[in-house]
Amino acid sequence: MNFPYNLSEVFPVAQREVVKIGHDLLPHGTSAFGGGKSFYLLQQRVSEILDTVGAASAQAQGLKTPITSGDKLRTHGEHMVS
């Protein structure tokens, strides 16, 4: 999958460990580029990645709709993606 940005900027710890993402759409162990607009941009990118991967997974499994998405993760505080 290709994205119009460098994934190591979104998930800087991914090369060393499993990345966990909670309902805030922020990878655990990362900062939000200093907050503000960058905070929103990071959440947007994580949501886009989850949506894309979720759609590809659903298609590969022959599902009608994706199980994983940024919106679903945001609205279910007890869920986590890793």
Image (spheres, helix red, strand yellow):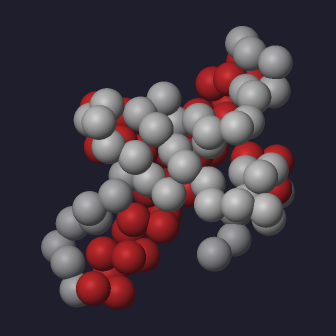
On screen, residue 76 versus residue 53, left or right, reads left
Residue for point 29% across, 36% down: 78
**Which residue of the protein is positioned furthest toward the top in this rendering?**
36
**Which residue of the protein is positioned furthest toward the front in this rendering?**
17
Q: How far across and how far down the image is residue 64, in percent? A: 17, 73
- Please tell me in which quadrant of the rendered image residue 3 appears: bottom right
In this picture, is 67 found above or below 47?
Answer: below
On screen, residue 52 versus residue 66, left or right, reads right
In this picture, is 7 found above or below 80?
Answer: below
Q: Nearer the viewer, residue 77 or 2?
A: 77
Residue for point 28% across, 64% down: 66
Residue for point 68% across, 31% down: 41
Q: Is residue 5 visible?
A: no
- Please tell me in which quadrant of the rendered image residue 49 appears: bottom right
Q: Is residue 58 visible?
A: yes
Q: Nearer the viewer, residue 81 or 60?
A: 81
In this picture, is 10 found above or below 7?
Answer: above
Q: Quadrant of the N terminus?
A: bottom right
Q: How far across and how far down the image is residue 79, in percent? A: 32, 43
Q: How far across and how far down the image is residue 72, in percent? A: 30, 43
Q: How far across and how far down the image is residue 29, in percent? A: 70, 38
In this picture, is 29 found above or below 36?
Answer: below
